[in-house]
Structures are given as C-alpha cells and as structure tokens.
Amino acid sequence: MTIFSQITADMQTGPATARSIETHLRAGIADETLAPGTRLPPIREAAWQLGCAPATVARAYRGLVLAGLAHGEVGRGTFVGGPDRRAAFPPSGPDDADPQSRIVDFAVNGFQMHDASPLVRAAFERAVSRMTDGLVPVGYSSPAGRVEDRAAAARFLAKWRPGTDAREVLLTHGAQSALFAAFQALAGRGGGIACDAATYPGVIGAAVALGIALHPVAGDANGMRPDALEAVCRRHSVSLVVVMPDVQNPTGISMPQTRRADLATVASRQGLMIVEDRIYGFLMPDAEPGFSSIAPERTVLVYGLSKCVAPVLRVGYAVGPESLIHHIEAVLNATSLMVSPLLADAASWLLEQPGLPERAASLRAGIARRAEYCLARLPGLQADRLAGGIAWLAVPEDWTADGFAAEAATRGVRVSPARHFCVEPRSAPQAVRLCLATVANEHRFQAGMDALAGLMSQSGRARLVSP
C-alpha cells in the first residue's frame, strides 16, 4: 500500500486531477492516516504512480501548503503538517514581575529590566485628560491615523527615513500588525517572500496565516547574503524581502553598510520590495543608514513601541512611499478600521518626550552589563552580537536544542530552541535564543544564567534514569 493506493483504485472513474489528489490527502490528514511529519512522495514519483503530469501533483501539494496542511523544505521535499506554528511565538510563562513566579523567563523578548510604567502612566493620563477636554476623538477616525499622530511619527522616524512626510506614515496595532498588513498588501495570497533562514517568529506566523510562501535565504557573519538572495529569486517567485539590519532576531547580527548596500542592489535588480523591521533600532543609535535611506522608493519601514516602551502600548507604524502605503492602508481599513485615538495620542506624546531616549540609554547600559555577565559564563557567545539584548547560544555537541530547553525548564529557566525561528524547522541549528532584558530582577537574571552555565558544562547524554 502506498499513500496513493486509494486514488489509483478510484482512477477507473477518471484520471487523477489536482483536486482529487488534494482531496485524498486532506482526508488522510484529517483521519491521521497521514501523521504530522510524514514525507509525501516526490512529485515525479507521485506523478508516475498516478499516471498524471508532475504539474498536477505540484498543484495538489501547493493547495495543501496554502491551507497550512503541509509544508515544503528546500532539498528535502513536502511534509504533512505546517511547521509547528502553534509555538511560532515562544510560549511565555508566569509574569516575571510576579514575585511568586519561580520561572526565570529568557524566552520572550521584552524589556522589563527597567520599569516603563511611569512613562506609560503619564502618557495615558494625559491622553484621557485630552479626551475629556474634547481634544482626542471618541469616534472613528481615518484608518491611517490622525494627521497629528502621523506627523509626530514622521518626525521621530526621520532619523531612519530622512524627509519622511506625514502622508507616508500609517498607524498600526504594533509592529506585528504593520508586518501582516505589508505582507498582505505587497505579496498577497500565493505570493512569495524572502527572509532570513532563522527569523522573527512573527514573520513566519504572518506568512502562514496569509498563505504566502516563505523562502529562506542563507546568511553569514554579516547577515543575509546577497548572492543567496539572488539565487532564491532565480528559483522562486518572490516579490518581497524582509530584513532586520540593526539587530537581527534571533541571531543578534547587525549588518555592515556594505552588506546593506549590496542587498539593496539585488532588490532593485530583481524588482523586490523591502520590508525593513527596525523594532530594535532604539538600541543602536549609531547604526549605519538602513534600507529606508538607501532604497526609499521600494522600502516600507516597520516600527513599534512594544520594545522601546512596553507591550501594553500597542501602537506601531508602517512608513514608505505613498505608492506602497496606499495599498497597506486598504488592508488596515479592512482588518482593523483604525488604531484607537486614545492610544495614538499617548504614543505621539511619548515619541517627543526626553524620557524615551533616557529609557533607551538606560536599557543599553543595562544590556551591556548583562552581556558581560553572559560572556564570562556561557562559551561561544560573540560580544558584538549582544547589544540588542539577544544571545544566540549554540548548545554543546551532545545536546539538541530541544533537549537543552527541556532540561533548562526543569531547572526553572525558560529558553527558546532554534526551531521556533526557522522557516524550515528540520534544518534548525542546535541553538537556543536567550533574551537578556526581560527579567526585571538582577539577582534572578544572574541565577538563571548561572543555571544555564551549569547545564552547558554537562553532557546531554547524562540523564537520571528512574527505576
């Protein structure tokens, strides 16, 4: 018996079609005859079994991928089940601010090491007062945001996109909302997006939800490789590339200027639009000019306040040429109508307060201290990749990343294994991501890192066996 035996038996009613193949496979997935992780036959082999054209099988497999029922891995084939996207965002545990919590959470990338609540409280109190005075509307406003809020964002973001006009700014419900809307507007269902092989899980989650194919691009010590991007564009239909030039999540790599320029050249040659995620830009005040400066005509800059302020302030921005922004605005109008003017007013005020750069400076100093602590205890880390508060830690050879994370959890420490970040999880390196700025209490941070250091010195094969 083969995966396609039943279809072959049914062929007396007519030749196999893409629809009949897909229907058969969907049924097998639904009743778990085809378990998650099952490798589907190669397209040409399946076509030979079914007596149809390879293109027919390819269309059937494509339908499963777009439905999230299967996923392809370059050089390995098509597998049942989407990559495990239930864990696309590493699960958060008990709030670290809870004194009763025994979990030291290095998995979720927040910046609670310094309390942002005084800043947020002042912004909210002011916004509520202005609403009471009739200066902040309680009704609907434009999907793009109020003119004054867009203007405040334009002034703030001009450091990364010089000359930004308010008309080129859209307000969103955080950077993730901006990413999602940009993907839908600029790539669309069935489209293709190039991204780092290991990337921010929100990129993967958005693409899966939208039915957009992600094509991983290999990188090196300087980030995404231009030649690899060019090769991906030759092999696949790609309309968009996602880049994180300052602090790449999860590796912490910052691109040198030559790499940024070379990637922009490839994007121009291949006709790609660029989504530039600079959510960590506040941690790199001396960073080289990014894609919004090098190639402003094809770049949409994405930013949000969840990192530089706090996740409670769900306000983000998409900034780019009006020709692109117009399409993204249409998606926002269809999906969220608008960002609350109350939140937007609070955010606009914060963008122009001295407390915001002061907080950024404080976070940079705190991360630098914690980076020194980690470098002294965890082998293999690179100092120049820790400035963004992310540590990409290769586990010892006799550990797997998942095994290391599971063992760390038994010791009260939560970390994120590499598969959470990989477009092709089966090709994930044996590494874990550590977030240095999430844990508020310094003693707990050090205790958690000490626990990981102890684990790094132990063999992954040494386990207690219960009788």
Image: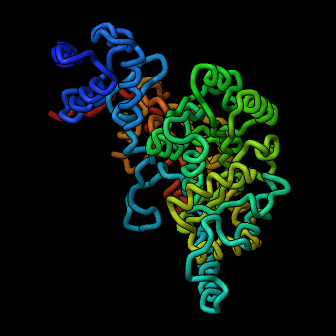
Residue found at the very far front of the displayed protein: 14
| Figure check: 375 above or below 215 | below
Left of 410 or right of it: where is 336? Answer: right
Q: Residue pushed farthest bottom?
A: 133
Residue 80 x/y as whole percent = 32, 28
Question: Height in image: 200 above or below 317?
Answer: above
Q: Quadrant of the C terminus?
A: top left
Residue under the image location 67 percent in, 86 percent down: 135
Whether residue 368 is visible to the viewer of this picture, yes or no, is: no
Q: Left or right: 313 with respect to 31?
A: right
In percent of width and height, residue 432 lies at 49, 38
Q: Residue at x 59, y 69 (%)?
A: 115
> Which residue is drawn at the image coordinates 59% and 77% (left, top)?
342
Q: Dividing the picture into quarters, in which one does residue 18 lie? A: top left
Residue found at the very far right of the displayed protein:
163
Q: Please tell me which residue lies in front, 343 or 92.
A: 343
Quadrant of the rendered structure where residue 83 is? top left
Q: Position of residue 359 (x, y in %)?
A: 69, 65
Q: Position of residue 406 (x, y in %)?
A: 36, 40
Q: Which quadrant is home to the N terminus? A: top left
Q: Looking at the picture, does residue 114 appear above or below residue 191?
A: below
> Quarter of the image holding residue 103?
bottom left
Examine the rendering and report whether any part of residue 57 can be seen: yes
Q: Relative to 98, is 360 on the left or the right?
A: right
Q: How many marks overall?
A: 0
